[in-house]
Image (cartoon, rainbow, N blue to C red):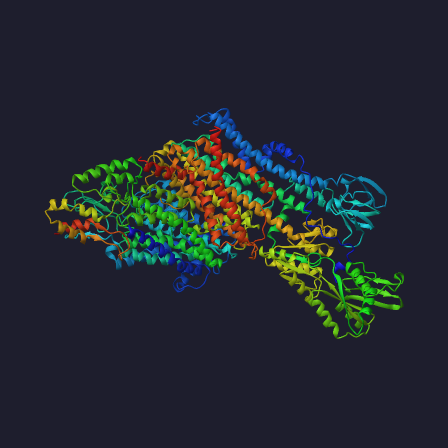
């Protein structure tokens, strides 16, 4: 059938209610406040052109607070107080933006700490080529080194098991308490992650990543934000924000002589206030927090992303390639029914099926044994006298060689037919009918034979995950196509595909088919995401735009992927796509909001500062005075940043809608809201400012 | 493609397009214009009985004496100033509606009209765009009938008739605004 | 009054009816499909292409296209500069006008080369017939054709086609579009009284005995391409207010329609290139949504007239200062908006004397540059705004923004931003510097807020390659000639380079198939969003100068000076 039959381990899917690793937020806000001040360092500010301009503005207004006549005679009333207030508000604008970033980083850091807790420097036993053991610090390990770990050790680096058999506690990274068996050779169980703890026995491990380059290290760097490189989208947005900032800088800088000429002179402090109000400080201040929070959300989902770019690419995915087993259906197919042919009785069939499965440790094999025993069959042969024949992708059969040269086999119907024919047996006519009837039920038919006699068909039932159809429906609405890959025959595959509601399927697929499906989709300009675990998935994972490797998968698969799911839950691909989209939506929503705010700020400030030019009637908001108008707009501009921090960190709630529905919804909330909200807020602040006598 | 190649291509294409657009096209339109619409193509000149040009039917003239219907005020005196005698000219006041100089000019103008018992109309106070506007509004022409009737001893009804004949109406009843062609009107006064 | 509105509506409807017809024709030309003019112009095209050694026109890459545009424009510029500079010794100068200062020659050359046609001179008193026809008349074709070619290359790139060959596009713009229409239009203009003569100024003795100099010349052919190519540089100083440039309602109709026809139709052409006419009409809707209110506002302002003068008259009368009787308030207002919307820059009434609301509207048009906008470039700018709107709001659907199936990434944002940025740079910075230098202030002829508008208008007109002016400004000095030259060059070539490179980059991208997750740009909602983005990005930048210019002037006027 497929590799699932040889799975040594199969983990229950993560319970959906446990969202993310619990990280401590104690002291987070205090630390963030401290960070907010530390980040006033101009070298830090220089990274963000928008906020850097605010920083310079603050310095200048501070200067004209100390000496209001620095750039010519001050015309405002109480210039020192007024300029001082502006300076103060600008400073708070900076602090709020810094605070937002610090909170996001702090949460990331907490996340990272919990990852790092497992990863203290330890002493590793390095195996020299001559076989001697040398104690070295884990940080000195290099790719390719061989190390030995024994029970109780923390595995010092990511690697691949080359010798030994041991159980490993991976709860530090997966949150699953059940230990996992590790042994060399097998695709799935041979990879170990640095930071996990070996519980029993010992292993020899070949290190596959230099220290600091392992998955956890990469994730720590990403969630902490320190190493975060901006994603392409973020860079493009930063460019646009920088350009808007430059435009407004020109507008404000040239306003001095223009206003002078129109005999409506404006003071430097007011101009800087107007500049800060107009440049996109809201999004500028929150942009990095949004990015960090996005990575943090990915980490909360227990997924390790190798780059922010990969997370962002998730939003653009238009095709998901999903393995049937484990993703669409529950991993374990169970024997549902035995259907005898060739005149054999049900009990005879059960007995042969049982005999064929005595060495089969897969859940499918065990379920066959259970069903057979229920039907009255019992173990009649001594295990020690029989030989198990393992499933292989080539033979597509497994079974047992019993004493007296009796061979019992079960497997794909075609394979068993071939086996029987090779022993010059007859293929009963009814077999195909039974086979088809099972397939039509969406089940997997396994033929059972003893030597050259076909006894019947086992109906293995696939159970489609509850709720999966609705999720695919949501994906379709979002414009994402789902393609199911399965080793099943066409009929079975089509039945399951229809039941699960995927858009397309590839039956009788080999791992090589995956890469071809991906290439075909990509040739159409689509971005493809897939999950995989085996070594033979590696090329496909690398080819896919977003490749999510299961943590239980091989090192090769993990290397090729750009994300690793620590829970090894393939269904999570859908969540990751949602996170990617949410990241982009949050960025877009706050940008739109920020720019839409400008209209109200203009209407607050321009009529006020140019009242001398007789355009006071444009003061549609009825703000009390020039000074209160400027202060109100500026206070609004500062306060909106902390007000939006929760949204920036949590992300805009994602709804599985079509692009146009999303646009109309978000335009209504963030566009129209962005135009209207500041009118109301500035007016309220104006009333408050006037009431307390600030201006 | 290197720069020199582009340079040579550019030079050749510039010459070719120049011949087409700056030589052939003007030459052809000039030829057709002169042949088919000789009068219009040469400026729609109006000749007197002696065959000498006394103006153009499309270009306004200054009329300030009592014997003629007055034309609109012009910022350039209808190109009759000696400094532009060689070339001709066109021009406007370019005064902003908020410019006090506009009122300084309009007030005496309105005064002058009122003294001649003419109710001031907008077109007689505002200078035209070209400074060569051949028209005045029907209202402005009619307001001058009593003055002309007195100066020339003509019946007001006859003057009204001449005004009606001098109207350049909308083209196809829809395009443009009607106006009384002052030169045409004043010529008809002289020809009575 | 009703008549006035009906005429505005009539011209507008004519333009709209013409749009799909001409738009389809332009698309056929540039998609190299057969047209009915092939038998006449096919051989001419081929002959011209052969002279430059092109037999089978091959597509150009972005930089090749840019290089071809720049080099050919430099060659044209040098040729025209020489003709103008040598005017006193060249023939075809019946009125024996003298030489020009070098700075005026430079300004005039750049002005016509960039399709701006800002004039710091008065045609009839300054230029010989030869200079007008052989220098400026030539540039009127090539500058319009350059714009058109760039506009076409831009949409080719956006829709994944090769950018095309600049020399071929330049030639075909002229032979297939500009020249045939100009030819037919010219004959209509001559029949309506526009002169086409090489005879010099006529001296006549008026009825009252004064000597009147009636300037004339080879006007009609010049006039038609001036309008059609959105050039706007008048043969006479006072442009289309002059009876010899625009003699009656019919010529005014032809000239108004001509100046809007190509930029209007080009949107439809874009629709054909995109294979999405719905998108084209929606974009057209954005343009009308700006254009119609501006026309109505301006016309209403002029119709109401100057309150202060109305008090004097004792009744409400339209503001006829700087206007011709034959055009009245309505056709003058429509023209003022059409000429600033399309970057034509010809005038049939004096903008300096427009009511403040008219000054506001004309300025706004030029700030935006997309209410149809310049020949070729205007439609491209419209799509730049679509791209920016897609980028700003497109993130809100949770995907990397796409336009016409291609991703908008950093390179596109950078190039689109250049276009966004160059306008304030070329307008506000020189305005501010000018106001700081007291010797320049003497050129400002109208005091107060309107004086500020004059300066802003001058640089806006230059940077937007419009060419109209608040003509009271004494702009014939070295300062104005040189600074506006810089503004024109920046406003023309920087965006052209950005447009071509943007299109080139888009063309090279792998198209992304359309899914339900794709943000559709051809919806009413997105069109509305784009309109607001245009308002915010385009208008907010210039709101302060509008506030201190025409808006302050309006309040000043209403409060009784």
Q: Is residue B34 above or below residue A342?
A: above
The residue sitting at the left extreme is: B153
Q: Nearer the viewer, residue B61 or A654?
A: A654
Image location of residue C520, percent across then percent down: 52, 54
Image location of residue A280, percent across then percent down: 52, 40
Q: Is residue A566 above or below residue A612?
A: below
Q: Nearer the viewer, residue C84 or C486?
A: C486
- Give residue C320's quadrant in the image: top left
Q: How many marks?
A: 0
Image location of residue A605, percent across then percent down: 45, 35
Seen at 34% across and 47% down, the residue is C336
Q: Nearer the viewer, residue A92 or A440?
A: A440
Q: Is residue C175 above or below residue A616?
A: below
Q: Nearer the viewer, residue C447 or A641?
A: A641
Q: Is residue B102 at all visible to an observer of this figure?
A: yes
Image location of residue B91, percent across then percent down: 28, 43
Rendered-image quadrant of the C terminus of chain C: top left
Q: Is residue A460 above or below residue C411?
A: below
Q: Is residue B22 at all visible to an observer of this figure?
A: no
């Amino acid at each position: 059938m497929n590799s699932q039959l040889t799975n040594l381990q199969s983990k229950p899917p993560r319970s959906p209610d446990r969202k993310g690793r619990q990280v401590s937020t104690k002291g987070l806000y205090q630390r963030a406040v401290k960070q907010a001040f530390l980040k006033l360092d101009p070298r830090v500010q220089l990274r963000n052109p928008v906020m850097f301009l605010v920083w310079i503005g603050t310095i200048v207004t501070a200067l004209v607070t100390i000496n209001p006549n620095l750039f010519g005679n001050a015309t405002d009333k109480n210039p020192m107080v007024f300029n001082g207030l502006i300076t103060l508000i600008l400073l708070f604008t900076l602090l709020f933006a810094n605070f937002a970033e610090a909170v996001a980083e702090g949460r990331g850091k907490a996340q990272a700490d919990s990852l790092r807790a497992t990863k203290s420097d330890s002493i590793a036993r390095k195996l020299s080529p001559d076989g001697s053991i040398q104690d070295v610090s884990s940080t000195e390990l290099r790719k390719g080194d061989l190390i030995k770990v024994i029970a109780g050790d923390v595995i010092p680096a990511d690697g691949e098991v080359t010798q030994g058999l041991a159980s490993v506690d991976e709860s530090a990274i997966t949150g699953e308490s059940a230990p996992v068996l590790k042994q060399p050779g097998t695709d799935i169980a041979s990879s170990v992650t640095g930071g996990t703890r070996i519980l029993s026995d010992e292993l020899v491990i070949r290190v596959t990543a230099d220290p600091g380059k392992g998955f956890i290290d990469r994730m720590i760097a990403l969630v902490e934000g320190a190493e975060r490189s901006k994603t392409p989208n973020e860079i493009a947005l930063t460019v646009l924000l920088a350009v808007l900032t430059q435009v407004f800088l020109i507008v404000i800088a040239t306003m001095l002589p223009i206003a002078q000429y129109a005999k409506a002179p404006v003071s430097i402090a007011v101009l800087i206030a107007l500049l800060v109000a107009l440049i996109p400080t809201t999004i500028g201040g929150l942009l990095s927090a949004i990015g960090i929070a996005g990575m943090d959300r990915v980490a909360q989902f227990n997924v390790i992303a190798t780059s922010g770019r990969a997370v962002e690419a998730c939003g653009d995915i238009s095709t998901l390639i999903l393995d049937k087993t484990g993703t669409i259906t529950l991993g374990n197919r169970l024997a549902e029914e035995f259907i005898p042919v060739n005149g054999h009785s049900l009990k005879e069939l059960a007995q042969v099926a049982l005999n064929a499965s005595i060495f089969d440790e897969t859940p499918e094999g065990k379920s066959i044994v259970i069903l057979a025993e229920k039907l009255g069959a019992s173990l009649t042969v001594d295990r020690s006298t029989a030989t198990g024949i393992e499933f292989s992708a080539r033979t597509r059969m497994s079974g047992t060689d019993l004493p007296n040269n009796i061979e019992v086999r079960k497997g794909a119907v075609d394979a068993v037919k071939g086996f029987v024919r090779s022993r010059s047996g007859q293929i009963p006519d009814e077999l195909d009918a039974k086979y088809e009837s099972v397939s039509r039920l969406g089940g997997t038919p396994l033929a059972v034979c003893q030597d050259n006699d076909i006894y019947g068909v086992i109906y293995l039932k696939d159970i489609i995950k509850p709720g999966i159809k609705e999720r695919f429906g949501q994906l379709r609405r979002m414009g994402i196509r789902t393609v199911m890959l399965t080793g099943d025959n066409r009929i079975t595959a089509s039945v399951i595909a229809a039941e699960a509601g995927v858009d397309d399927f590839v039956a009788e697929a080999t791992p090589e088919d995956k890469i071809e499906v991906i290439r075909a989709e990509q040739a159409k300009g689509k971005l493809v995401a897939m999950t995989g675990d085996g070594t033979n998935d590696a090329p496909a994972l690398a080819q896919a735009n977003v490749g999510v490797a299961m943590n239980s998968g091989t090192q090769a698969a993990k290397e090729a992927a750009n994300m690793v799911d620590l829970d090894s839950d393939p269904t999570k691909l859908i969540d990751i796509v949602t996170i990617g989209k949410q990241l982009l939506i949050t960025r877009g929503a706050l940008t739109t909001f920020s720019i839409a705010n400008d209209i109200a700020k203009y209407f607050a400030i321009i009529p006020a500062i140019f009242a001398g030019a007789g355009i006071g009637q444009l003061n549609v908001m009825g703000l009390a005075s020039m000074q209160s108008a400027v202060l109100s707009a500026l206070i609004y501009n500062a306060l909106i940043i902390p007000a939006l921090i929760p949204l920036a960190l949590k992300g805009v709630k994602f709804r599985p809608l079509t692009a146009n529905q999303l646009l109309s919804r978000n335009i209504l909330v963030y566009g129209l809201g962005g135009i209207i909200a500041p009118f109301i807020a500035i007016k309220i602040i104006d009333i408050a400012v006037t009431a307390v006598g600030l201006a | 493609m290197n720069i020199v190649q582009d340079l040579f291509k550019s030079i050749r294409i510039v010459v070719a397009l120049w011949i087409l657009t700056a030589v052939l096209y003007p030459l052809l339109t000039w030829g057709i214009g002169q042949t088919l619409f000789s009068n219009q193509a040469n400026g729609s000149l109006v000749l007197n009985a002696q065959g000498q040009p006394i103006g153009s039917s499309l270009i306004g003239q200054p009329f300030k004496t009592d014997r003629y219907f007055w034309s609109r005020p012009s910022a350039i005196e209808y190109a009759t100033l000696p400094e532009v005698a060689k070339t001709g000219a066109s021009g406007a006041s370019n005064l902003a509606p908020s410019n006090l100089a506009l009122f300084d000019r309009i007030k005496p103008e309105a005064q002058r009209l009122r003294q001649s018992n003419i109710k001031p109309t907008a077109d007689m106070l505002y200078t035209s765009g070209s400074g060569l506007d051949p028209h005045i509004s029907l209202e402005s022409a009619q307001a001058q009938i009593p003055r002309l009737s007195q100066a020339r001893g003509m019946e007001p009804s006859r003057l009204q008739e001449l005004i009606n004949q001098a109207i350049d109406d909308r083209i196809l009843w829809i395009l443009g605004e009607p106006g009384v062609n002052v030169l045409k009107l004043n010529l008809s006064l002289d020809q009575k | 009054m009703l008549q006035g509105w009906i005429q505005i509506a009539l011209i507008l409807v004519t333009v709209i009816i013409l749009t799909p017809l001409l738009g389809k024709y332009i698309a056929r030309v540039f998609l190299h499909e057969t047209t009915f003019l092939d038998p006449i112009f096919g051989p001419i095209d081929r002959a011209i292409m052969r002279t430059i050694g092109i037999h089978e026109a091959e597509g150009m890459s972005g930089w090749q296209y840019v290089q071809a545009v720049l080099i050919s424009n430099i060659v044209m510029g040098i040729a025209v500069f020489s003709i103008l500079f040598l005017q006193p010794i060249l023939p075809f100068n019946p009125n024996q006008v003298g030489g020009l200062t070098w700075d005026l020659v430079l300004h005039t050359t750049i002005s016509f080369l960039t399709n701006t046609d800002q004039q710091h001179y008065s045609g009839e008193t300054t230029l010989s017939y030869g200079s007008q026809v052989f220098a400026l008349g030539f540039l009127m074709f090539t500058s319009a054709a350059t714009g058109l070619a760039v506009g076409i290359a831009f949409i080719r790139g956006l829709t994944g086609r090769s950018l095309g060959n600049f020399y071929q596009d330049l030639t075909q713009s002229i032979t297939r579009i500009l020249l045939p229409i100009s030819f037919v239009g010219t004959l209509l203009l001559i029949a309506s009284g526009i002169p086409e003569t090489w005879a010099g100024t006529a001296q006549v003795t008026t009825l009252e005995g004064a000597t009147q100099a009636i300037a004339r010349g080879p006007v009609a052919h010049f006039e038609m391409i001036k309008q059609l190519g959105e050039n706007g540089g008048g043969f006479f100083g006072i442009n289309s207010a002059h009876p010899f440039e625009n003699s009656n309602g019919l010529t005014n109709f032809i000239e108004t329609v001509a100046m809007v026809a190509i930029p209007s139709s080009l949107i439809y052409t874009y629709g054909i290139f995109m294979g999405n006419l719905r998108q084209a009409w929606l974009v057209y809707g954005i343009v009308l949504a700006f254009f119609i209110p501006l026309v109505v506002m301006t016309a209403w302002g002029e119709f109401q007239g100057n309150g202060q003068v109305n008090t004097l008259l004792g009744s409400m009368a339209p503001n006829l200062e700087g206007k011709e009787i034959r055009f009245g308030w309505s056709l003058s207002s429509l023209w003022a908006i059409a000429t600033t919307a399309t970057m034509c820059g010809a005038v049939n009434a004096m903008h300096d004397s427009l009511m403040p609301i008219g000054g506001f509207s004309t300025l706004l048009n030029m700030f935006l540059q997309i209410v149809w906008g310049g020949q070729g470039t205007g439609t491209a700018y419209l799509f730049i705004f679509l791209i920016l709107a897609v980028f700003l709001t497109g993130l809100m659907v949770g995907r990397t923004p796409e336009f016409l199936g291609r991703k908008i990434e950093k390179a596109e944002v950078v190039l689109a931003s250049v276009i966004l940025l160059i306008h304030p740079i070329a307008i506000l910075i020189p305005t501010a510097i000018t106001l700081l230098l007291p010797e320049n202030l003497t050129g400002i002829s109208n005091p107060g807020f309107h004086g500020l508008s004059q300066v802003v208008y001058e640089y806006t007109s230059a940077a937007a390659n419009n060419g109209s002016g608040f003509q009271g400004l004494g702009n014939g000095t070295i300062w104005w000639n040189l600074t506006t030259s810089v503004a024109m060059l920046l406003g023309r070539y920087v965006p052209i380079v950005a447009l071509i490179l943007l299109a080139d980059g888009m063309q090279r991208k792998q198209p992304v198939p359309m899914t339900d997750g794709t943000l559709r740009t051809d919806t009413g909602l997105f069109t509305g969003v784009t309109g607001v983005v245009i308002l915010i990005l385009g208008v907010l930048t210039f709101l302060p100068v509008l506030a201190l210019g025409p808006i302050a002037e309006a309040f000043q006027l209403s409060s009784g000076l």
